[in-house]
Image (cartoon, rainbow, N blue to C red):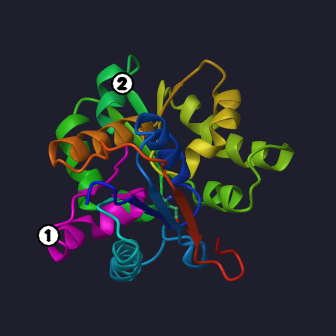
Amino acid sequence: MNRGAVGFFDSGLGGLCILDAFKRECPSESTVYIADSANCPYGNRSAEEIVALSDANVKRLLEAGCKMIVVACNTASAAALEFLRSKYSDVPFVGIEPAIKPAAMESKTGVVGVLATAGTFGGRLYNETKAKFAKNVTVIATVADEFVDLVERGETSGEEAERIVRRKIEPLIAASCDKIVLGCTHFPHLRSLIEKVAAGRAEIIEPSLAVALRAKSVLESRGLANAGGGEAKHVFISTKRGDSR
Ligand code: DGL
């Protein structure tokens, strides 16, 4: 079992930022990544649809022999994590949610911006964390579906991308946000543009490394880490027609 791969899935390419962090932290682990780009975006789908799509991704990862699954998508974690944990009760799952806790704790202005999808903002995970850890700050929630499109198109730089990023970030800065949480795994791919626009006026917070470290600690605590060495293999699967590798 320890030589099995760690499975990852996202609605598309977003979760690759978590995969990259994981590969740096756990270089001897093999991975299988599913980019469900044929069904992207997940952000505005119903919870039932996201559960069904997540279930299909998990089945495929388990058929590929995965020993643990990282739901590398905030929207899928919000809608489907509970369902997946109860359906596949012997499989460890690691999910992701917007890093609102550190943002709220470290904010000096008392105003925090969160960028995510409608699905994430509507989910219990986000709302419970917000109620628990962000009681004393003002949270400005902004849906930024346009960022998902940019990343899926591979357009992470250039004038048009900068204009779209500016339109979402400037209002947050104008509202005194000094922390901006990237609550969708597609958004770190636009990090250099977001930082250029925020230009020292707000700190960008995103949890890829924290999720990778959590995955590492779950592997270790469950005795699933690949201690035996051997070369790690990495498989990337895209559900987009003509794009499977
Ligand atoms: N990458 C996904 C997330 O973290 C969402 C993108 C989408 O709308 O499909 O929420």
- Part of the protein shown in magenta: 70-98
Mark 2 vs mark 1: in front: 1
Left/right of residue 127 with respect to residue 183 in the rendered view: left
Left/right of residue 154 with respect to residue 115 in the rendered view: right
Residue furthest out toward the right? 159
Could you tell which of marks 2 and 1 lies nearer the N-terminus? 1
In percent of the image, x 38 and y 74: which residue is there? 54
In percent of the image, x 22 and y 41: which residue is there? 220
Indicate whether 54 appears above or below 216: below
- Reading the image, the residue beneath label 1 is 89
Instruction: Please state the horizontal and vertical placement of residue 209, each as a whole percent of the image.
Output: 42, 35
In the image, the residue with mark 2 has its CB under 8 Å from the nearest atom of ligand 1: no
Q: Nearer the viewer, residue 92 or 77?
A: 92
Q: Is residue 99 visible?
A: no
Bin the neighbour count of mark 2 within 10 Å (Cα to Cα): few under 14, some 14-19, many 20 and up: some
Q: Quadrant of residue 157?
A: top right
Q: Quadrant of the N terminus?
A: bottom left
* Distance in Å between CA atoms under marks 2 and 1: 40 Å
Residue 89 counted in the magenta span: yes
